[in-house]
Image (cartoon, grey):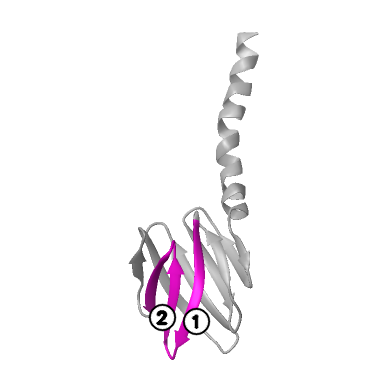
Amino acid sequence: MTSTSFPLRRKLAVLPFVLLPLAAAAACGGENSKTSCDLNSCTVTFDRGVEASASVLGMKAELVSVQGETVTLRIGGRNVTVPVGDGQQQVEGIGVSVQSVTKDQVVVRISNNG
């Protein structure tokens, strides 16, 4: 009986690691935005012209404004201004970069690993 319980224990021990990516993907979502997440980062596409927000990596991210090539976001209650495509800013221990801005959408990458 002992020999059959070891494979079962191994399978049960691995189960949380298999489900972790699913939990990370399920933890992101929003209003007037689309999110795509993996274990360490999320890409958020905010719609412009409406109040847009997303819940990513345990924080609320909101699109505040776009002025030319500069985007202002509110992450975890703090404002951060990020230039489009020019590196990333740090806020609340995460990295924030703006990948693109169009007349309809703003694409932002938010990552745990800064």
Q: Nearer the viewer, residue 113 or 34?
A: 34
Instruction: Report if the CB atoms under discs 2 and 1 are less than 8 Å apart.
Output: yes
* Number of other residues with Cα within 10 Å of mark 1, as a class: few under 14, some 14 to 19, many 20 or more: some
What is the secondary structure assignment of the residue under circle 1? strand
Compared with residue 57, is residue 19 higher up or lower down, i.e. above or below?
above
Give the percent coordinates (x, y) of residue 86: 36, 80
Would you name the residue on which mark 1 appears? 100
Choose top left, top right, bottom left or bottom right for residue 11. top right
Mark number displayed over residue 27: none
- Residue at the spot 34% in from the left edge and 70% down from the top edge: 89
- Side of 100 where 27 appears, left or right: right
Amino acid at the residue labelled 2: Gly
* Number of other residues with Cα within 10 Å of mark 2, as a class: few under 14, some 14 to 19, many 20 or more: some
Give the percent coordinates (x, y) of residue 8: 63, 22
Q: Quadrant of the C terminus?
A: bottom left
- Residue at the spot 59% in from the left edge and 41% down from the top edge: 18
Mark with earlier residue (2, 1): 2
Would you name the residue on which mark 2 appears? 85
Amino acid at the residue labelled 1: Ser
Asked if the stretch drawn in magenta spans residue 79, the answer is yes
